[in-house]
Image (cartoon, rainbow, N blue to C red):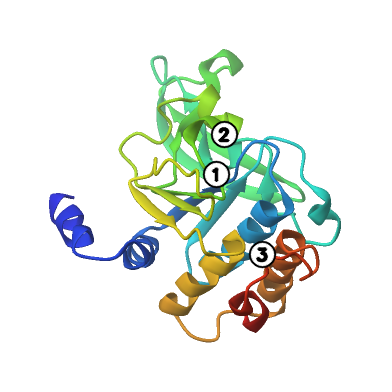
Amino acid sequence: YFAMIVNLMDLTPKQQVSELIRQAQNILIVTGREPNNDQLASAVGLHAIITKLGKTANVVITDRLPKAASVLDTSMVAKDMSGTRDFVIHLDTARAAVDKLRYDVEGAGIAITITPHGGNFEAKDVTFGYGAYQFDLVIALGVPSLSKLDRLHEANPTIFDGLHLINIDYHRINENYGSVNLVDTAATCVAEILISIIESLGQGMIDAQVATAFLTSFMSATANFTAPATSAKALTI
């Protein structure tokens, strides 16, 4: 872990982001409270890219989605953290040992069969719960400060402890709260910054789904390319 930190310190923020994405296996993508179209569209596009890399990505937005949700596929967006944790079934073996265990898929359900050895089990022996969160990297999109991060952080203040938090944003008021801060105040929107990261991760990764998501981001941030802040780079992209 220490060696990884030393190596990252030798890289630019953009290179650090690319390297952390390459090293991670389960990535959590979050936005701000009451996310705007840019944040949502960027999260949808980034989710598709991370999936293309063969990794697991989870987008969690606990607030209501903005208007862009009507034109984008947001089926991957979760309202809570349940999808980032294992569902654990616990069996008390104090009164009987387990001889065999198997499971069978039956229609829309799974039947778990436990063969006892030396006794038997009762319904009261079975409980369930959740395991530890499974993500090993967090990416925040378009959030200028921790206080404006999705409410999931407020509800679980220690949820990101021990993890790299990548802060990708273009707001001048960004407080650089991440362990890696890629803040480009010259960018038009979050998607513009993400495209440069994607180019460093591989070629030919932007398909129709990703392009549609990022176009939605650009159009929203620039009022359909009419806002004075619309840059030549935004139009080129």
Residue type at the position of mark 3: Ala
**Coordinates of residue 14 in the picture (x, y in percent):** 37, 66
Earlier residue among tags 2 and 1: 1
Q: Report helix, strand or loop for mark 1.
A: loop
| Residue topped by disc 3 | 229
In this rendering, does residue 89 appear at all? no
How far is the residue under mark 3 from the one under mark 1? 19 Å
Q: Residue at x 40, y 36 (%)?
A: 160
Residue type at the position of mark 2: Lys
User: Viewer-nearest of labels 3 and 2?
Assistant: 3
The reply to whether the C-beta atoms of the residues labelled 2 and 1 are less than 8 Å apart is yes
**Coordinates of residue 36 in the picture (x, y in percent):** 71, 48
- Picture disc at residue 148: 2
Q: Residues within 10 Å of mark 3 (few under 14, many from 20)?
A: some
Question: Quick one: 164 or 121, which is closer to the camera?
Answer: 164
In this rendering, does residue 223 appear at all? yes
User: Would you place residue 158 above or below residue 133 in this image?
Assistant: above
| Residue topped by disc 1 | 143
